[in-house]
């Protein structure tokens, strides 16, 4: 089982949407998917409502921080399960260094049942609250959607420095920093496209050769709980489908889940 963390210190940049899209793509490819929702806001959880396939004994995401627990993800379908966000996630601020490593341990115990685990994180870095750092400790790789703007350079540098620190400070020396994905890009805005060009020049291949445009069809697809590349209608929708296919295939291949 490969573990992917999706992170950024900002909210609203598309983290949860990237988690959902990557999950759909992995399921379509016949991979067994485990979702972990470490964001109290529960966007990932909302995107995958109960299906009735579970027997009701499932545990939630905050249990991954417990000293002793039996972790039982909620079964959504054969080969698809979730550890949902829960209220206790907002009360984990006291977790120590030991606790930060617990999710990694518990998730490894589930490794034989899944091909990929996707962890959604809240828009915070640091070590407190511990959800993001714990996801990064557990992960094989991290990918970061980001909003494009003239003032993003500092935030992206901070984000990348933090991720390098996670490796350098021994939290997870093997963490692969997959890269940054321009997300919710207003492709009709010349200023924004110029800003993206500038960021690409500055950050080089840290910014992945991908781009997710801000498109109404993405919101619609999320609301309808289906992949944006299914049943496309119109040019904008087709563009969105192409962008999301490319991004999710890139992520899954880079992670080693797809050949
Ligand atoms: N490419 C996109 N085009 C249009 N809307 C998007 C796109 N990506 C995300 N959104 C919307 O933007 C909002 C924030 O996205 P979300 O994934 O929840 O961000 P985060 O998890 O980083 O807070 C959501 O309403 C989502 O549906
Ligand atoms: Mg989110």
Image (cartoon, rainbow, N blue to C red):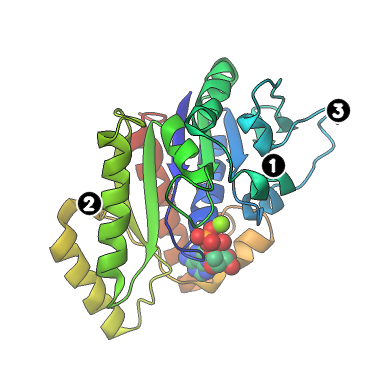
Mark 2 Cα shell of 10 Å, populated few (<14), some (14-19), many (≥20): some
Q: Is residue 20 above or below residue 182?
A: above
Disc 3 from disc 2: Cα separation: 43 Å
Which residue occupies 66% across, 38% down?
62
Which residue occupies 79% across, 43% down?
50
Q: Secondary structure at mark 3?
A: loop
Of mark 3 and mark 1, the one earlier in the sequence is: 3
Residue 217 location in percent, x, y?
Answer: 55, 68
- For label 3, the residue is 55
Which residue occupies 35% across, 82% down?
188
| Labelled pair 3, 1 in contact (Cβ < 8 Å) | no
- For label 2, the residue is 206
Q: Is residue 218 visible?
A: no
Mark 3 Cα shell of 10 Å, populated few (<14), some (14-19), many (≥20): few
Q: Which mark is residue 169?
A: none
Left/right of residue 223 with respect to residue 190 in the rendered view? right
Left/right of residue 255 with respect to residue 12 in the rendered view? left
Disc 3 from disc 1: Cα separation: 15 Å
Left/right of residue 179 with respect to residue 30 in the rendered view? left
Mark count: 3
- For label 1, the residue is 84
Q: Is residue 252 above or below residue 154?
A: above
Mark 3 within 8 Å of ligand 2, using the beta carbon:
no
Q: Secondary structure at mark 1?
A: loop
Q: Is residue 124 visible?
A: yes
Location of residue 35 (image quadrant): top right
Disc 2 from disc 1: Cα separation: 31 Å
Of mark 3 and mark 2, the one earlier in the sequence is: 3
Q: Is residue 254 above or below residue 189?
A: above
Between 174 and 115, the residue placed more toward the observer is 174
Which residue occupies 65% across, 52% down?
40
């Amino acid at each position: 089982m490969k573990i992917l963390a999706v992170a950024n210190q900002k909210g609203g940049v598309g983290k949860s949407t990237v988690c959902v899209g990557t999950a759909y793509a992995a399921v379509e490819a016949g991979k067994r998917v485990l979702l972990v929702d470490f964001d109290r806001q529960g966007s990932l959880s909302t995107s995958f409502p109960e299906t009735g396939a579970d027997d009701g004994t499932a545990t939630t995401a905050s249990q991954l921080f417990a000293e002793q627990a039996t972790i039982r993800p909620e079964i959504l379908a054969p080969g698809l399960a979730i550890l949902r966000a829960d209220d206790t996630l907002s009360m984990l601020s006291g977790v120590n260094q030991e606790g930060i490593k617990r999710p990694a341990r518990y998730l490894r115990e589930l490794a034989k049942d899944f091909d990929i685990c996707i962890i959604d994180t809240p828009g915070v870095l640091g070590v407190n609250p511990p959800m993001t750092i714990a996801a990064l400790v557990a992960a094989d790789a991290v990918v970061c959607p980001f909003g494009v703007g003239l003032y993003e350079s500092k935030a992206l540098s901070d984000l990348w420095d933090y991720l390098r620190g996670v490796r350098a400070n021994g939290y997870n020396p093997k963490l692969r920093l997959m890269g940054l994905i321009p997300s919710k890009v207003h492709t009709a805005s010349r200023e924004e496209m110029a800003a993206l060009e500038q960021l690409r020049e500055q950050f080089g291949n840290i910014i992945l050769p991908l781009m997710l445009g801000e498109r109404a069809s993405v919101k619609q697809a999320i609301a309808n709980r289906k992949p944006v590349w299914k049943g496309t209608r119109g040019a904008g929708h087709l563009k969105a489908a192409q962008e999301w296919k490319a991004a999710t295939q890139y992520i899954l291949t880079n992670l080693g889940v797809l050949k």
